[in-house]
Image (cartoon, rainbow, N blue to C red):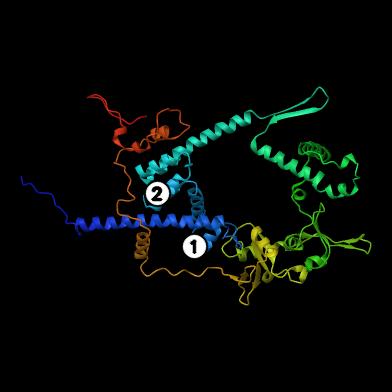
Amino acid sequence: MQMQSPTVLATPHPASELDRLGDEIAELSAHLDAATARLLELIRQFDARGGWNTGFSSCAAWLSWRVGLDLGAARERVRVARALETLPLLAQALACGELSYAKVRALTRVATPETEARRLGVGRAGTAAHVERIVRGWRCVDRRAEAREAKRRHATRALHVYQGEDGMVVLKGRLEPEVGALLMQALAAARESLYQRARPRATFNAGAGDVSAETPSVSQQRADALALLAETALHHGLDPGTPGERYQVVVHVDAEVLANPEQPGQSVLEGGTHVSAETSQRLACDASRVVMRHDGDGRVVEIGARTRTIPSALRRALHHRDQGCRFPGCGGRFTQGHHLRHWAQGGPTTLSNLALLCRRHHRAVHEEGYQVACLPDGALQFRRPDGRPLPEVPAPDVAPGDPVKALRESHDAQGLRVNARTGCATWLGERLNVTWAIDVLHPLAVSARPCLAETLTQSSARVSTPAGGSSKGPS
């Protein structure tokens, strides 16, 4: 019988060359992570100082427009940038290239200043996959704890109402956070209606010795506000009304004011609250309107039928053409129709004189000084309040001829020493026991064992057994 030796295929490149290639990949990745730390710091400063507030709804929206990031990725960058402000250890590890952005992004979802050191140990010891699994387990424990707390709060809600010995009614209770917030907002609105709006008239009518002129304390004002809420609820029969009437905002505005904000005249909400003429113009851009004519004494002499500013058929064509907000970098789906030249100033309600804008940018155009005009080719030209054009797509930045060399030189100038081992995890290949990891790391875990983040993936954490037995990690 003739034996054949196995065939060994020749490696197309020497192993040393491939090792050098792998080292270069690892080193450059660490450089990129260090550069990402600087990028996140710049984003944090830009966000905190409101540099994005030039017509954009958020820093993420600005990043999507200016840098070309996907909006979801931009939101994540801003989130991580904000989180790292209070997590200096993680920020420093990223800046040195010791932790990848993927690890830091995951750790910032659960890290706090009190637990940051433990999270850093997890990041250094494990791979990105390990970190993601531990973070998922950590958040699962958090969610269970939050669910238990929410259930406990719901079960302990109560409101006690009883009459004291002096005849006064006493209220004492516990409300869930969202219900309590609703009550506090309602009390604040009722208190404002009772006191702050009526204060000028009361002050004018009060005499020097009038007891009613004394301002009640805040607690007394809240008591009166609660009475107003109860009276209002009973007056309306606890019926919020039909949805169509319930969510309407009625504005009374003179035609002269609507056409020219400089003209004198009324521009008020149904309750009498004054709003600017620009606000009235924005609300009238895309709304139903009723024309009421008055005589010289202010009496109504004619009321027209309610009509829609933009008919339904025209609105469908507008949505089909614009497909969302036309403001540069926005594209929001929840929009309002905007007259490029307002209908009150003689602008026609036609497709060529209309554009879709989201609520935020509709306000920017009417009340914040932004301008929009239709160019001869049909394109829209937006301008900032100072008159500078706001392009649909920003001009691209010029990158250095050799960006990798420029990045390395920049880090060398900072004294940052990065090599192929900088970002490597200390994991030795052992199987990850997520249950045990969460047990020793999470402060809400039932185990009283000390934190051993550094030994998370090391064999020293395993328990040896006598011969013939087996060994396993802590459960």
Task: Return the residue nearer the eye: 59 or 320.
Answer: 59
Q: Is residue 171 visible?
A: yes
Q: Which residue is mark 2?
A: 93
What residue is shown at x 87% (from left), y 42% (from top)? 213
User: Taking 330 as reference, is 282 left or right?
Assistant: right
The image shows residue 421 at horizontal and vertical percentages of 30, 51
Determine the secondary structure under disc 1. loop
Question: Is the residue 61 above or below the residue 142 in the image?
Answer: below
What residue is shown at x 55% (from left), y 60% (from top)? 62
Extreme residue toward the top, this view? 165
Q: Quadrant of residue 472?
A: top left
Q: Is residue 126 visible?
A: no
User: Taking 159 as reference, is 234 left or right?
Assistant: right
Circle 2/circle 1 CB separation < 8 Å: no
Q: Residues within 10 Å of mark 2 (few under 14, many from 20)?
A: many
What residue is shown at x 83% (from left), y 25% (from top)? 167
What residue is shown at x 67% (from left), y 63% (from top)? 368
Extreme residue toward the right, this view? 297
Extreme residue toward the left, this view? 1
Count the marks: 2
From the viewer's perspective, is the residue at label 2 or at label 1 nearer? Answer: 2
The image shows residue 59 at horizontal and vertical percentages of 55, 57
User: Taking 57 as reference, is 163 left or right?
Assistant: right
Q: Quadrant of residue 313?
A: bottom right
Question: Is the residue 305 above or below the residue 159 in the image?
Answer: below
Question: CA separation, marks 2 and 1?
Answer: 27 Å
The image shows residue 46 at horizontal and vertical percentages of 53, 58
| Label at residue 68 | 1
Q: Quadrant of residue 390?
A: bottom right
Placement of the N terminus among the 4 image quadrants = top left
Task: Return the residue nearer the eye: 55 or 407.
Answer: 407
Determine the secondary structure under disc 2. helix
